[in-house]
Amino acid sequence: MTRAISLTISSDPEQLAPVRHAIEKIASDLGFDSDAVAKIGLCVNEALANVIRHAYQGSTDQPIQINAEPTNVGLKIIIRDWGNGVNPDTLPPKPHDPLKPGGLGLICMREMMDEVIFEPQDKGMQLTMNKKRADRPDENHSVGAAA
């Protein structure tokens, strides 16, 4: 059975790839197809980049907690920061300008994940993203089997 993971990283962009790979491994072990695995990885990467850029204003030494756990229908990912605590759901929508970098992270998360929830904390923000498997494995499929 695939186990949950809990990671604490610094807000250094060099931490993004190892976290993304760890989450993609869990998603793959849970039976997500390669397209879904890539989308989950992209969403985690974008969420972490947003924490670094917006919550911590580019500071590379602040904590970020990432938890990923199997659910009955897929995968739950929780990302917790102790940054500025601004909930993007409360901000007015910005039109995307394809000539300017940025602005696609939230769009990707909302389009590629089944559920995206921002919960302000006493300090910082907690983001929960849920992704359901397209087809749940049957009894003959061993979820979490090593490749």
Image (spheres, helix red, strand yellow):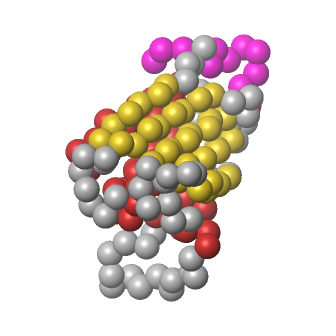
Q: Is residue 19 above or below residue 51?
A: above
**Quadrant position of the N terminus in the picture:** top right
Location of residue 40 in the rendering, given as x and y in whole percent from the top left corner: 51, 46
- Residue extent of the magenta highlight: 136-147
Residue at 38%, 33% in the rendered image: 8
Q: Is residue 17 visible?
A: no
Q: Is residue 79 above or below residue 90?
A: above
**Quadrant position of the C terminus in the picture:** top left
Residue 110: image quadrant is bottom right
Residue at 57%, 51% in the rendered image: 121
* Residue ranking furthest to the front: 122
Location of residue 36 in the rendering, given as x and y in whole percent from the top left corner: 55, 44
Q: Residue 87 versus residue 143: which sits nearer the camera?
A: 87
Q: Residue 5 versus residue 26: which sits nearer the camera?
A: 5
Q: In this image, 133 relative to 14: left or right? A: right
Q: Residue 54 versus residue 84: which sits nearer the camera?
A: 84
Q: Is residue 86 visible?
A: yes
**Count of numbered badges drawn on the protein:** 0
Residue 22: image quadrant is top left
Secondary structure mostly seen in the magenta stretch: loop
Location of residue 47 in the rendering, given as x and y in whole percent from the top left corner: 45, 54
Q: In this image, 7 relative to 120: left or right? A: left
